[in-house]
Amino acid sequence: MITETDQEVTQSEIVSYEPATGEELWRGKTSDIDDLVDTARRAWPGWAAQPLSNRMELVRRYANEVRKEHDKLVETICRETGKPKWEAGEEVEAVVNQVEISIRAYAERTAQRKFDNALQGTMAVRHKPHGVMAVLAPFNLPAEVPNAHIVPALIAGNAVIFKPSEKAPATGELLARCFNRAGISAAVMQFAIGGPEQGMDLVAHEGIDGILFTGSAHAGITINRKLAARPDKIVTLQMSGNNPLVVWDTPKLTDAAALVVRSAFTGAGQRSTSARRLIVSTSMYESLIAEVKKLADRLIFGKPFDEPSPFMGPVIDNQAADGLTESFLYLLSHGGKAIKHLVRPDESLPFLTPGIIDVTAIKDRPDVELLGPILQVIKVEDFDEAISEANNTRFGLAAALVGGSPQDYNRFWANVRCGIVNWNRPTIDLSAAAPAGGVGLSGNHRPAGYYSADYCAYPVSSAEMEQPRAAVGVGLRDDG
């Protein structure tokens, strides 16, 4: 049965295992959250008081530290997540590139402004940091995603407590060390070890001023409920997606198939923006699916450092592999028709081959995020039905149209309810120079990426004059 639950980790020690081998990679004791928050609160005023130029220079030094640790960071990501080396390398490059983009974004999104108000003086707009921010990150992009929260938060003058996923703590620890080696103290940029219990302790802590979360909808909703009576805390929720990819009226079947495969199976289908649902016209169905299956059959899956390089590695752990296998069987038993079976070659390791299943005949399709290499195919008769099917979800993260005319894309863009809408590009195609976030159960209207500065600092408006000048002009008794 398909469910959306998070693994409970309550032990006093966190252990990270390599998905590709099952061997232990890293071990650490869970953090004392009260101690971390107390330290951060003491350090924050000094950090916030530094000139903005100083904070920007220090995050640039951090980028240089990441460059120095490039090979080690790539190796750690590979071993901890099972990603192929090429994919981990792209992630580390994105970490470095995000720094200058974040600096530019902060300057643009939080620029100081002054408006002359004639005899009333000047109206000024400036921004202040929130205080101490908790960054809660996922395992699927263990360096890139937290980096996209942490760097803007530090630039804005916040102190940060970073808790990576309990499934990727080694990558998180190495990232935190790069910040500290750059001159950002371990009191200002702190590394927290823990699982969901420690994460919720951070969420509920009185000393935390903001929560920057990326992860499952289940965990995000829990955070939202926990803080329902706390409007004083800034909460950013970047959550799951049941993302549609529509293929429509294109003769370029080989290209379309490549976009489908890249959208659905890059990262073993574990990105929040991965395509979960392929929506295709009945007229194109046979020819497109034949091309998609042919390409999917050629994909190499294997260990991160295998030669030739695999396209995809394992999913994160055996629990995830078990759940995905059960979900595929659930779809089969409820009317789904297998196009390419999801296969697990070794029950002791979480390797899965890409699975493709036609779910058109399933009346009530489960609206959940299957975080893995499962692509559900749905046939439709016309473009209106394609758009309706794309919107047939509580989520709203990413969507893509492959093929179609400019007029079709305009209709698609205008009517599909998502925070990321692409045309003839994969659903996973994002840029740090643009906002990235979703609606519905995919987010709370606080996109990350270029717009991260918006939730890392708050605007303060000030009416200002160099000398006091005022009078009461009405409502006074005549002294004479």
Image (spheres, rainbow, N blue to C red):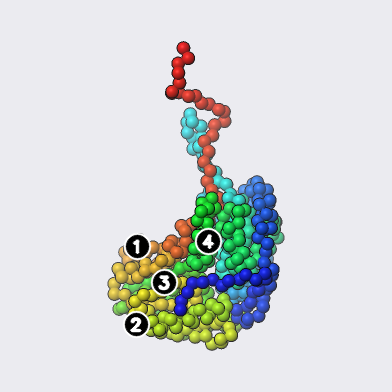
Q: Is residue 169 above or below residue 124?
A: below
Residue in the picture at 62% in, 57% down: 160
Residue in the picture at 45% in, 18% down: 477
Residues at marks 2 and 1, CA–CA distance in whole angstroms: 27 Å
Say which label, 2 or 1, has the lower sequence index: 2
Towards the viewer: 82 or 104 = 82
Q: Which mark is residue 286?
A: 2
Q: Amino acid at mark 1?
A: Asn
Towards the viewer: 66 or 163 = 163
How many residues crowd around disc 2 within 10 Å: few (fewer than 14), some, or many (20 or more)?
A: few
How many residues crowd around disc 4 within 10 Å: few (fewer than 14), some, or many (20 or more)?
A: many
Q: Amino acid at mark 4?
A: Ile
Looking at the rendered image, the disc whose residue lies closer to the viewer, 3 or 4, is 4
Looking at the rendered image, the disc whose residue lies closer to the viewer, 4 or 2, is 4
Say which label, 4 or 1, has the lower sequence index: 4
Secondary structure under badge 4? helix
Say which label, 3 or 4, has the lower sequence index: 4
Residues at marks 3 and 2, CA–CA distance in whole angstroms: 25 Å
Looking at the rendered image, the disc whose residue lies closer to the viewer, 3 or 1, is 3
Secondary structure under badge 3? loop
